[in-house]
Amino acid sequence: MHDDLSSAPLPPQGPQPARRRRSAARLDAEMWRALLACEETATAYQASTYRQGETQCWFWAGALSDSGHGKLKAGRAGGGAAAGRTVTAHVYGYQLHRQRLITPTPAMPDPVVGHTCDEPSCQNPRHWELVSRGDNVRAYHQRKHRFPLNDTRTRNGRKSARAEALRDAIRRAQAAQERAQALRERGEAVPDDLQAAADVEAALRRASEAGRPPEEFQTIALF
């Protein structure tokens, strides 16, 4: 559930109107193959993905779309037509992980990569599923009243607010890790508060729970 396929592969089409922004245009299969073969793009993707345990969400620490999906600026891709494109991170990741393109079929003419975890910035392949756009929309409406889809920051504000909070928590904790490491290298003691701030997973838990609706806290307290 949760999907952004602004850069989904489509069958080759005619030239796009000049007024369309280059980064927003859909990529054809040839361009996707160039991106998937580009080591620079793969390295950038891996560097922006914060991995936790195998079953946990792997949150995106890079740029985000208005909907909270990760956005990846592609590398040179051999200098071809795909160079410099901005793609949706989990759409790129899905194809990179499976080493095959997302291709419409008669049975599924409008495939999208959905998130079973309902976290739009998640990059854990175990949390992705290829579903039809209609099924993805129906799943959203069935689960939109559950956490994290009902996060107070996204329910009452920007759709990207939760993903931004999680991303910023990762960045702050990683910066604290770097400061702590610098102290160690100089032979200095690391203060307890800096050590605590460097715990990325604890920072992620706090950032996530900060958006939990009050009524859910009450329900949890009852059990």
Image (cartoon, rainbow, N blue to C red):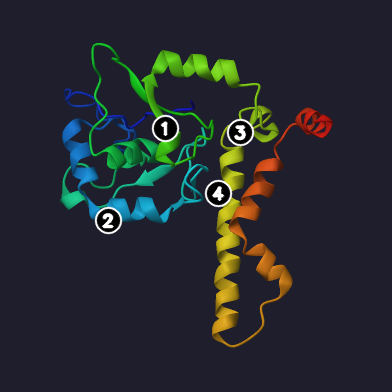
Quadrant (top left/top right/bottom left/bottom right) for the C terminus: top right
Q: Amino acid at mark 3?
A: Arg
Q: Which mark is residue 128?
A: 1
What is the spatial separation of the Cα atoms under label 1 and label 4, in whole angstroms?
19 Å
Question: Disc 3 vs disc 1: which is toward the camera?
Answer: 1
What is the spatial separation of the Cα atoms under label 4 and label 2, in whole angstroms?
22 Å
Question: Disc 1 vs disc 4: which is toward the camera?
Answer: 1
What is the spatial separation of the Cα atoms under label 2 and label 1, in whole angstroms?
24 Å
Viewer-nearest residue: 75 or 104:
104
x and y, in percent, of residue 170 in the image: 56, 54
Question: Disc 4 vs disc 3: which is toward the camera?
Answer: 4
Q: Which residue is mark 4?
A: 167
**Does 139 sit left or right of 10 as displayed?**
right
How many residues crowd mark 2 within 10 Å: few (<14), some (14–19), many (20+)?
some
x and y, in percent, of residue 159 in the image: 58, 32
Q: In terms of sequence position, does the residue under pointer 4 or pointer 3 come before the other?
A: 3
Q: Which mark is residue 40?
A: 2
How many residues crowd mark 1 within 10 Å: few (<14), some (14–19), many (20+)?
many
Q: Which residue is mark 3?
A: 158
Number of callouts: 4
Query: Is there a contact, CB below 8 Å, between mark 2 and mark 3?
Result: no
Q: Amino acid at mark 4?
A: Arg
Q: Amino acid at mark 2?
A: Glu
Q: In terms of sequence position, does the residue under pointer 2 or pointer 3 come before the other?
A: 2
What is the spatial separation of the Cα atoms under label 2 and label 3, in whole angstroms?
31 Å
Q: In terms of sequence position, does the residue under pointer 4 or pointer 2 come before the other?
A: 2
Numbered disc 4: secondary structure: helix
Which residue sits at x=65%, y=25%? 146
Query: Is there a contact, CB below 8 Å, between mark 4 and mark 2?
Result: no
Numbered disc 3: secondary structure: loop
What is the spatial separation of the Cα atoms under label 3 and label 1, in whole angstroms?
23 Å
What is the spatial separation of the Cα atoms under label 4 and label 3, in whole angstroms?
15 Å
